[in-house]
Image (cartoon, rainbow, N blue to C red):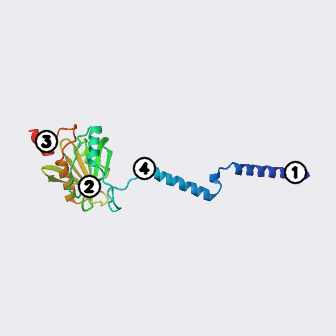
Amino acid sequence: MAGDSSIVRNVAGEREILVRVASENKPKVFETGRDMILSIGVIVVAMFAVVGATGLCTINPEDSQQGPVREVDARSFLDLEARSTGIAIRIPEVPEGWYTNSARRQSLAGELASTVGFVSPNDGYVSATQTNVGLPEAAKQFDGNFRPDERTVDVEGVEATVYSSEDEEVRPVWAADLGDVRLVLSGSASEADFTTVLESFIDAPVADGVGSAPEGGVGASTQSSQ
């Protein structure tokens, strides 16, 4: 029995030593729950600082109610896109009171496309995507949503097809072939706003060094080819 008691004491002693050693070797940051919370807080703050500095943190471009939104230099973006993508990018001039709040490159039907978002004076939002993809493929593969309804509108002699759905969550899409580039419009705006943006692109020149449309826009391009 004495031998058994000695063994028990030895085991207990060894366990105590192991626990003490493990405690001593444990990193200070994990010693208490408070330390862990403080460490996590520091990591979160650092993460937001890095993301904010790189500009990867963005807001929904359609939501203009979140406060002042920084205006994007659409002209510089589109000029750079024209040189790097090979697309005949048009650089529109929207009317006074409109501004550009977003600009990005995206993939459309497996091809590069350039998209700029415009906000109207009444807070309507229209995204304008320029692509080499033909119609109607560019419109039907724009975002994967099904739009069974089709109608056409004439804007300055250019026929645009409007694709829509009864589903309120699916935004309408306007698609027009401007000759040198296909234009796909979408967003949450009135028909008048869509028309205004389309007119701006019809009258816009192609960026220098890309495409062949003269300063007069699509109309002048048609004239010169006759």
In the image, taking residue 211 as reference, residue 4 lies left or right, namely right
> Dot 1 lies on which element?
helix
Q: Amino acid at mark 2?
A: Tyr
Question: Dot 3: what SS?
Answer: helix
Q: CA distance from mark 1 to mark 3?
A: 102 Å
Q: Residue 133, position in %: x, y?
A: 25, 42
Q: Is residue 213 left or right of residue 77?
A: left
Q: Nearer the viewer, mark 3 or mark 2?
A: 2
| Comes first in the chain, label 3 or label 2 | 2
Q: Earlier in the sequence, mark 4 or mark 1?
A: 1
State yes or no: discs 3 and 4 in contact (Cβ < 8 Å). Answer: no
Q: Label 1 amino acid?
A: Ser
Residue at 26% x, 53% y: name it.
186
Residue 194 or residue 101, whichever sits in front: 101
- In this rendering, which labeled residue sits more in front, label 1 or label 2? 2
Gap between marks 4 and 2, in whole Å?
24 Å
x and y, in percent, of residue 176 in the image: 20, 48
Residue at numbered disc 1: 6
- Residue sitting farthest toward the right: 2
Q: Quadrant of residue 121 in the image? A: bottom left
Residue 221: numbered disc? 3
- The vertical placement of 134 against 172, above or below, is above
Distance between mark 3 and mark 2 Cα atoms: 27 Å
Query: Which residue is under mark 2?
Result: 99
Say which label, 3 or 4, has the lower sequence index: 4
Amino acid type at image mark 3: Ser
Toward the viewer: 175 or 37?
37
CA gap between label 4 and label 1 equals 64 Å
The numbered dot on residue 53 is 4
Is label 3 or label 4 in front?
4
